[in-house]
Amino acid sequence: MTTAFDPTQELISVTDAAVEFLSAAAAKQPEKSVRFSTKPAGCSGYAYTLDFVDETHTSDVMVSAGNELKIAVDTESIAMLKGTIIDVEQLGLNRVIKYINPNVTGECGCGESFSVS
């Protein structure tokens, strides 16, 4: 799946809560970068990956979130991720990352994977 990148449209957005959460995690690993992508997985087709990596890819698109946080977005995943909002949700004592993706056409029952058309 390929798409032309349009710099006039927002690729992804990150809520204030997610910026705070990711910035705190990034501060513990200052030598690493945050990278957002997808991978084939689960019963629905794809899973999100939001990782701390040693190096970003030269083809990644860099997105600024907050004052200091930068997220590298995998160009091969842009068609599936365009318009996604990254948020953090409090579930009991834990905070979990939540993805609000307008491209999703289906999800598996456990919520671990998604499909796009």
Image: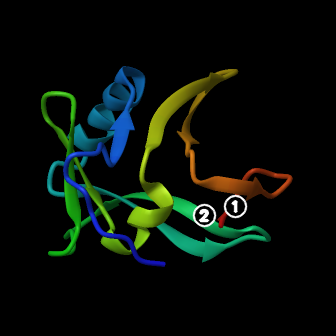
According to the picture, the residue beneath numbered tag 2 turns out to be 47
Q: Considering the image in quadrants, where does the C terminus appear?
A: bottom right
Q: Secondary structure at mark 2?
A: strand
Residue drawn at x 76%, y 67% is: 44
| Quarter-of-image position of residue 75 | bottom left
According to the picture, the residue beneath numbered tag 1 turns out to be 113
**Which amino acid type is marked by label 2?**
Ala
Is 74 left or right of 59, judged from the image as shown? right
Between discs 1 and 2, the one toward the N terminus: 2
| Quarter-of-image position of residue 50 | bottom left
Please say if 62 is above or below 4. Answer: above
Q: Residues within 10 Å of mark 1 (few under 14, many from 20)?
A: many
The location of residue 38, given as percent across then percent down, is 50, 67
Q: Secondary structure at mark 1?
A: loop
Residue drawn at x 16%, y 48% is: 30
Residue drawn at x 58%, y 53% is: 103
Q: Nearer the viewer, residue 80 or 69?
A: 80
| Quarter-of-image position of residue 105 | bottom right
Is 4 left or right of 115, judged from the image as shown? left
